[in-house]
Image (spheres, rainbow, N blue to C red):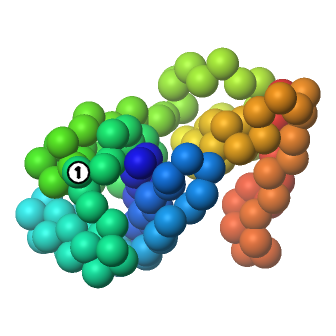
Amino acid sequence: MFLAIDVGNTNVTIGIFKGDTLRATWRLATDIDRLGDEYGSLILSLVQHSGLSTDEVKDAAMTCVVPELEPVFQMVCSRYFGVTPLVVGVGTRTGLKVLTRTATTWAAPLLRVRASLSRRLFSGRQSCIAWSLPGRMPPSDAIQ
């Protein structure tokens, strides 16, 4: 399975994929004062409550706009899932061409994760458009 983590200023969104299927998703409050073991035990509890096993997680990727929490979630991935996450940031090379005016803004890491997942889900197609719910930034991206 694949663990995806998006650490935002307000929420931490976590998802677990099995193949192309999203098996579970959770949202936690972002808190720079929370320790790695606190996040880890909470996430572990949520995973187990969903009937999933941390042993099945073989890969992880994360994006983080809160610099203080990047090492915290790297430790969570390592200690509780036994994986080293790919940390996706502005300079991360994904092999994708993102066609948007906001590619160099604060939303760039989220864009690249969304683009990578879209490419995986819709492989074999030349292009796709990823669209967010209202109120999310950026609302859409063209991906080639």
| Label 1 packing within 10 angstroms: few (<14), some (14-19), many (20+) | few
Viewer-nearest residue: 17 or 113 = 17
Left or right: 128 with respect to 52?
right
Left or right: 75 with respect to 69?
left
Left or right: 140 with respect to 25?
right
Q: Is residue 34 above or below residue 101?
A: below
Image coords of residue 15 (percent x, y)? 46, 61
Q: Is residue 42 above or below residue 131?
A: below
Q: Is residue 74 above or below residue 139?
A: above
Q: Which residue is mark 1?
A: 55
Instruction: Give me the residue at 48% from left, 70% from top.
Output: 25
Task: Name the image quarter holding the C terminus.
Answer: top right
Q: Quadrant of residue 94?
A: top right
Instruction: Give me the residue at 17% from left, 63% from top.
Output: 40
Left or right: 54 with respect to 110?
left
Query: Tag 1's secondary structure?
Result: helix
Instruction: Give me the residue at 44% from left, 58% from top.
Output: 16
| Count of numbered circles in the view | 1
- Three-letter amino acid code at disc 1? Asp
Viewer-nearest residue: 120 or 56 = 56
Q: Is residue 71 visible?
A: no
Q: Is residue 44 visible?
A: yes
Instruction: Give me the residue at 14% from left, 70% from top.
Output: 41
Viewer-nearest residue: 87 or 1 = 1
Q: Quadrant of residue 82?
A: top left
Image coords of residue 109 (percent x, y)? 55, 42
Image coords of residue 12 (percent x, y)? 40, 66
Image coords of residue 2 (percent x, y)? 43, 47
